[in-house]
Amino acid sequence: MSYAYLFKYIIIGDTGVGKSCLLLQFTDKRFQPVHDLTIGVEFGARMITIDNKPIKLQIWDTAGQESFRSITRSYYRGAAGALLVYDITRRETFNHLASWLEDARQHANANMTIMLIGNKCDLAHRRAVSTEEGEQFAKEHGLIFMEASAKTAQNVEEAFIKTAATIYKKIQDGVFDVSNESYGIKVGYGGIPGPSGGRDGSTSQGGGCCG
Amino acid sequence: MSMEASELQDLSDDADYAASQQQGSASMMRCDSSKRSSPSEHEDAELIYLKDNVAIHPTQFASERISGRLKLTKQDSILFLSWIPYKGQSSNAKLSEKDRSLYTITAVPFTEVRSIKRHTPAFGWQYVIVVQSSGLAHPPLYFYNGGVREFLAIVKQHVFLARSAEDASVFLVNDFQSPLQRTLSSLELPSSLPVASGQSTYPSDGGSLNENQGRTSSDVGNRVSSLSQYGLRKHKSHDPTRDLSIHLLEKFSLVTKFARETTTQLFSENNGFGSADRRWNNQPVHSYSDKLSNIAEEKHHEISHSYSENDLLKDEDISNDIDVPADPLEFNKLSLVWGKPRQPQMGSKEFTAFLDSEGRVVESKALRERVFYGGIEHQLRREVWPFLLGYYAYDLTYAEREYLRSVKRMEYATLKQQWQSISPEQAKRFTKYRERKGLIDKDVVRTDRAFEYYEGDDNLNVNSMRDILLTYSFYNFDLGYCQGMSDYLSPILFVMGDESESFWCFVALMERLGPNFNRDQNGMHTQLFALSKLVELLDSPLHNYFKQNDCLNYFFCFRWILIQFKREFEYEKTMQLWEVLWTHYLSEHLHLYVCVAILKRFRSKIIGEQMDFDTLLKFINELSGHIDLDSTIRDAEALCICAGENGAASIPPGTPPSLPLDEGILYPQEDDVL
Ligand SMILES: Nc1nc2c(ncn2[C@@H]2O[C@H](COP(=O)(O)OP(=O)(O)O)[C@@H](O)[C@H]2O)c(=O)[nH]1
Ligand SMILES: [Mg+2]
């Protein structure tokens, strides 16, 4: 199927927060609690439509354990969007966000759009991180934020699409030089490239970020 | 254990060390008399630092260590590192000059160095690992006379060196990106230091010592001319691997003698997959899953298909816009050895024939050979795997094994008690335990649950898996638990059934593969490095392709190596592969040859489609479930035989599953400060 743009996404966050389940919910529209833990990286893809344009998302789902960080870093290259996921029922996964963000800032391009996702919001009775805390963190670091559930599918579609819409807007605003694939964007065969060759993205920080 | 460690440190017994000392001083004299004798591109380089008796350990054998000289030179304000092995070191006749040149590091500019890992154990030799920006890591450089700190201090005087925030033993070179790291690394390096301890020298006249380099290049010259004998194009570059390819070609005539079967094609990538390639290339590239279903279709034909030379030519004409360099091993296809056809699995009767009346395995090598070529019938696996893994010694009798099992069962129970007796109150104050348990609990329910044995809620086997992993994390507290371990344990538990027996088999396996799970990923990096060396040796065009496309870190093979292809084959096939690998029959590192075999099979696709790192990673990932095991094992066998000693020498010492070099500290926790 032809697309106007292809965006590379990467899903990061501690192990067990539900990264793979989010991906599966988004690509296959199902929740499968019994699947294998991720080793290295796994891939998913789906077409979406933004502004009447077909956009293909190529999604990299990574392993979360600490010792694999050095490998995971090599996957950031050329990602246009990142979903940074924590588990609202496990405080420590929220506490680790800063270090994930540090990795992302260091190894991804500065214009990468980052969506913070507080997953497992179906487990509200076991909540260990409040919605406000999530919002606050996102605000402080210039991220988009949503709580979601890979189990009930709440906000899953929205999270992936909102991220794409933000990237799309950046293209329209000329933030990216879309002919430069290191931004994680490929122009497809049927694509009408937006204004390109805008300002030099590598010097500007993404999303009005960090203080 | 401490005995071993102190023996390691006592160098006076080490013949090689003594030889290298003599060698060191001898070559020093030669150098002095031949200063600036050979014109080279580094003629006007300033010598900054020179250290003798810095060695590389290509294999675990002391006799095969290569001593040499480490130098830092400076030219046009760029610092270069080089390591040149000594010439004609007598103590190790087995090593040819070619082996030496494989490891030679010729003037790597520090602009291309990413990091230096420093290892200064309390016992054993100090070493550094130099990692280039491409991700390529050089094998450890052992400083027989010590002086690693001093070396780093000198480097620090010339380039910006910052201690990595993640790993205190790693120093990042010219890493200005992270202000955090820069502050962290106000580097407790001594700014002035006692000069010239040991054999280091700091020539003040800036004279360059090119003697070794000069020789090496002329040797290469000789070998390059021998290349033309084989009708290949002459190469200007002094690329030692090129020599090795030639060496390989020379070897083929010998190799043919190994050939038992020549009925099928060995390197079948152009055969079965050729037609698929053609079709794919006419389509815009969207989804590899489409392609993979094509692979699945083509797979049936793969082995039986045989193309004529004409077909091959035609295929290339049509399918490749990109000129795919020929596979150097195909050059002499007809004389190549084929891997032996797979035999039927070994059954009970056959196994019993390997045992004497009291149950000892009389000829362990013959048994391993038998398993290597055919594997084991499933019901028999639980008897044979403990041998292959090294849990049972081959010379144990039936009775002794029975006794071992009972002793080990009690030992396991004791170990398991250690965590079972942790009260909730104690657990509150035992973060590490809670973290590990949490991780293991999460992972055992995500391991092979679609497989019948682990299926369903409240599955007892899943509980056993959890108990074994938790017990192991106490048995080996330093290593702990890491993702991927459950992938190894799953088939072991399925085969052994018994919890204690599974635990001890798993322990034995982790003796070999534990380094895969080291926190600093050192075990993985050594294997990926060795793999890159093997590809360089066995398919230099493919190696060059990876080099040009920034793929030399071989991270795309990460999953293959971490869990030995567990995710690439279906369950039964994985067990078949593992028992072959565990025989250590042709090589301890057959798994690396398996990697090479698969890469070679898809080389023309990889190069033809000009895959970049991302595309390659995705492609490799999605090969899962589409690789034919038997032909892959045969290819790996053939490659291993072809590579011979050069292959073995491409694999740095201590590369898993070889035992680590400094056995004193199995899983070093480096928190010492420089
Ligand atoms: N209740 C609930 N459980 C979830 C949700 N997402 C994931 N899980 C569970 O959390 C576990 C880990 O999910 P997984 O996707 O493998 O985590 P990953 O390591 O981040 O990829 C799985 O066993 C899922 O059953 C969710 O939204 N709600
Ligand atoms: Mg996952």
Image (cartoon, helix red, strand yellow):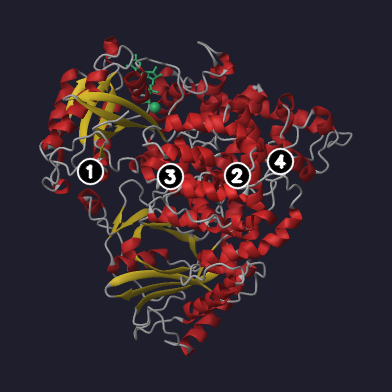
- Viewer-proximal residue among B65 and B575: B575
Secondary structure of residue under mark 4: helix
Give x and y (percent) for residue B154.
33, 69
User: Which residue position holds label 2?
Assistant: B268
Distance (Cα) linking label 1 and label 4: 48 Å
Q: Is mark 3 within 8 Å of ligand 2?
A: no
Q: Is residue B81 above or below residue A151?
A: below
The residue under label 3 is which amino acid type?
Phe
Judge the density around disc 2: few (<14), some (14-19), many (≥20) Cα neighbours within 10 Å: many
User: Which residue position holds label 1?
Assistant: A109
Q: Which mark is residue B555?
A: 3
| Marks 1 & 3, CB-CB < 8 Å contact | no
Which residue is located at x 39 percent, y 33 percent? A65
Secondary structure of residue under mark 1: loop
The residue under label 4 is which amino acid type?
Phe
Q: Is residue B584 left or right of residue B68?
A: right
Judge the density around disc 3: few (<14), some (14-19), many (≥20) Cα neighbours within 10 Å: many
Subunit that carries the residue with mark 2: B
Closest to the camera, between mark 4 and mark 2, is 2
